[in-house]
Image (tube, rainbow, N blue to C red):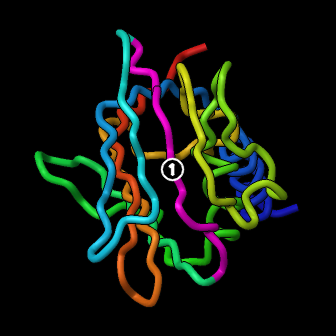
Amino acid sequence: MTLWWMINGLLILWTVSVGSKKSNYEVRFESIEAVNGSTETLFLYQLRLLGRNRMINGSLIFLEDLDDTFDVLFESHAFKNGCWVKGIVNSATKPCEFFTRYYLSYFRIISPESNLPTTGAEVCPFRKGTYYVKNGVASTEDWPPIVFKGLNRYTISYLKNGESTGGVQFTISITETIT
């Protein structure tokens, strides 16, 4: 076996071992605010952050089923060198795909008292109604080993016929914990 093949093999093994590493992150919510619709607001977020740990408390009121007649615009920004820079996770998609691909995998809220949907069947479509969360935190168990540490801002907007009908914007601080 030549030296070139041995080096390539070692690089591949090293890449796989580093890439498959599970990272542990701590997320602290810095702010959370509702995004109003341009003509009407169909999705109301009445959330606030409480306590030293800044846990999510409050309610979400969906005045319509969030089905495939809507679009979801998801935007991410990272705070780098004193300004907000567009992040790498941005998408415009249908609600079912957004909630199963992004919300359930990366932004699911863990709460001892909540009626938020927790499975793909419950979020497709996301039904009209009032949802509540008490002492909620973001689940980081499925996060990849590569994320922007520090301040990150995410905006989720719900669009119908190209018009904004509400949404939410939250800023979080991400730190990697050493285990």
Quadrant where the C terminus sits is top right
Give the residue furthest to the bottom.
161
Classify 10 Å Cα crowding around label 1: few (below 14), some (14-19), many (20 and above).
some
| Spot occupied by residue 153 in the image (x, y as percentages of width and height) | 33, 49
Residue 70 vs residue 147, the one in the foreground: 70
Q: Nearer the viewer, residue 166 or 30?
A: 166
- Picture coordinates of residue 52, whole percent (x, y): 35, 9
The magenta-colored residue range is 53-68
Is 10 positioned to the left or the right of 54 in the image? right
Q: Percent position (x, y) of residue 98?
A: 62, 66
Q: Point out the residue furthest to the left here.
A: 82
* Above or below: residue 29 compared with residue 120: above
The residue tagged 1 is 61
Where on the picture, by quarter, is residue 96?
bottom right
Q: What kind of residue is marked 1?
A: Ile
Question: Residue lying furthest top in this view?
Answer: 52
Please tell me whether residue 59 belongs to the stretch shown in magenta.
Answer: yes
Figure check: 116 above or below 11: above
Q: Is residue 171 left or right of residue 56?
A: left
Q: Residue at x 37, y 65 (%)?
A: 41
Residue 159 position (above or below residue 102): below
- Magenta stretch: includes residue 87: no
**Residue at horizontal 88%, vertical 61%?**
1
Residue found at the very far right of the displayed protein: 1
Instruction: Give me the residue at 36% from left, 83% from top.
Output: 163
